[in-house]
Amino acid sequence: MDVLLISIFKPNIEENSDEKNINKIDDGSKVPLVSFTTVINSLETIYTYLLQQDNISEYVKSLDKIKNFIREKQMNSIIRTQ
């Protein structure tokens, strides 16, 4: 399940690409920052969706792992700013 989530968010790079092709990826396109509140709210939306589905235990476990990871990053961010 975790591998599925990783593959969803992983950049699309051809499996047979060599180091030259990897270096051609545009470093200038930056991912916009998203607040922790937005991330947690989005995870809650996904969680609500999953509760409406069948056989979701593996997905919920993965979602809980992601949520814990985000909360840990949030706490580290708060600690660093103090």
Image (cartoon, rainbow, N blue to C red):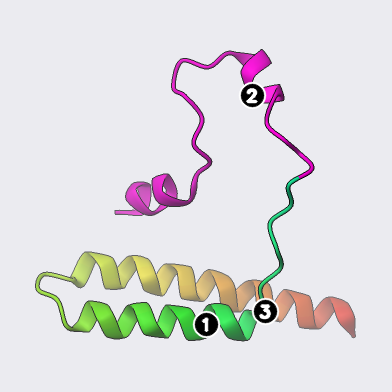
Q: Is residue 65 above or below residue 8?
A: below
- The Cα–Cα distance between marks 3 and 2, rounded to whole angstroms, is 29 Å
**CA neighbours of label 1 inside 10 A, class few (<14), some (14 to 19), many (20+):** some
Q: Would you say 35 lies left or right of 69 here?
A: right
Disc 1 residue type (three-letter):
Ile
Q: Would you say 64 lies left or right of 30 here?
A: left
- Work out whether mark 3 precedes mark 1 in sequence or the reverse, and give the earlier one: 3
Q: Position of residue 57 (x, y in %)?
A: 19, 71
Q: Secondary structure at mark 1?
A: helix
Name the residue nearer the viewer: 54 or 77. Answer: 54
Disc 2 residue type (three-letter):
Ile
From the image, tell me which residue sits under label 2. 22
- The Cα–Cα distance between marks 2 and 1, rounded to whole angstroms, is 32 Å
Q: Is residue 58 above or below residue 79?
A: above
- Work out whether mark 2 precedes mark 1 in sequence or the reverse, and give the earlier one: 2
Q: Position of residue 22 (x, y in %)?
A: 64, 24
Residue interval drawn in magenta? 1-28
Q: Position of residue 81 (x, y in %)?
A: 88, 81
Query: What number is the disc on residue 35?
Result: 3
Disc 3 residue type (three-letter):
Ser
